[in-house]
Image (cartoon, helix red, strand yellow):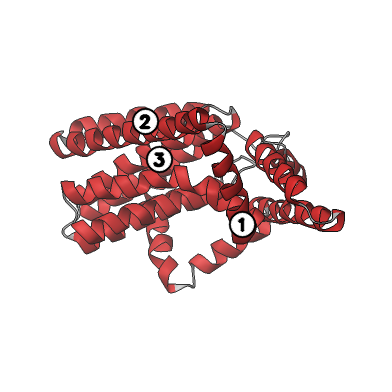
Amino acid sequence: MATDVITKDAAHLAIVEEVIGSVAHAAHLPFTGHLLSLNEGAFLCHGCIHSSDRRSGALACYEIAGVAATIKSLAPTNRKLGPMLAILMQGLLFSTGIVLFGRKRIGQFFGMLLLSTWAFIHPFLGLLVAFGPTQLKKVISYYLQKLHLDYHFAGLAVLSAIFVLFALKLGVSLFIVRYLNRENEEKWEEWQTKWTARANLLKPKKKSEHELTPLRGTLRDLRSPLFLLSFALTWIFLLVQKESWSEFVWLALRPLGVAFLFLYLLRSPTILRVFSHASERVGVLKPIHRRLLLVRHYWETRKNL
């Protein structure tokens, strides 16, 4: 029974993430990442309810998230590895909560708490990769000092907005944990069926002719407001603090080059093929590969009904 439920959860989460997530990201809808992470958390909580102990619960969450991340990599969208990484990391964070506090409500809530942090910290991880720890620390320290001395109200408003959003997300997480532990399977099945049906309506029949190449997609990502703002703030800092023009040019172009390389790899089909090849051979990825085979069998069985 437990294996069947977990396979179904993995299958339905995958289809929702593959289609609805792709459409929402392509349309640049606000708070898409937060809503999708809460949706993933609901599936992971349900997987825990049908597990026998904390070990099997954590493994179930890892497999559910891993299957959804793998199928996300096959979605007809330009952004593949980034959302794929988010799904998997959120699953690992949730599993950590289950390992530490058990598979019941308290473990599920702490799992949701850890899962919820990813949407807030991953932009900083991206900037860390682009600018490096030393340079990023200098930039952050410079602007924190400026905010404290000259723009205290603006800095307080930004921090307050982040805190309110995080608190709201935790409130929804607590509701999800309580709701799923009280409701019956019929309502859960109805909810799953509804979202899967909506996803199938949105699912494209063939690959889009306008899908960007990895190079063009990377150049478009570099024009996103987050990257443009981060580069602008860094260049202003470097211009103020510069000791020579050669140092300024080097430090200004280095993060741009690192960001270009990183974003290109996120879109590269070669990287995705490497991950697919590794999932069949690397021990820690084998449970995901095994569950993926069960999910494929599940969808094939449904098509034949």
The residue closer to the viewer here, 274 or 171, is 171
Looking at the image, residue 245 sits to the left or right of residue 88; the answer is: right
The mark that comes first in sequence, 2 or 1, is 1
Name the residue tied to disc 3.
37
Regarding residue 12, the answer to whether it shows in the image is: no
Name the residue tied to disc 1.
129
Q: Nearer the viewer, mark 2 or mark 1?
A: 2
Report how far apart the C-alphas of labels 3 and 2 lie in the structure: 17 Å
Report how far apart the C-alphas of labels 1 and 3 lie in the structure: 23 Å
Q: Position of residue 32 (x, y in %)?
A: 48, 32
Looking at the image, residue 186 sits to the left or right of residue 249; the answer is: left
Looking at the image, residue 28 sits to the left or right of residue 61; the answer is: right
Q: Amino acid at mark 1?
A: Val
Q: How many numbered tags mark residues here?
A: 3
The residue closer to the viewer here, 168 or 95, is 168
Q: Nearer the viewer, mark 3 or mark 2?
A: 2
Q: Amino acid at mark 3?
A: Ser
Name the residue tied to disc 2.
164
Counting other residues with Cα less than 10 Å from the Cα at mark 1, is it few (<14), some (14-19), or many (20 or more)?
some
Looking at the image, residue 126 sits to the left or right of residue 44; the answer is: right
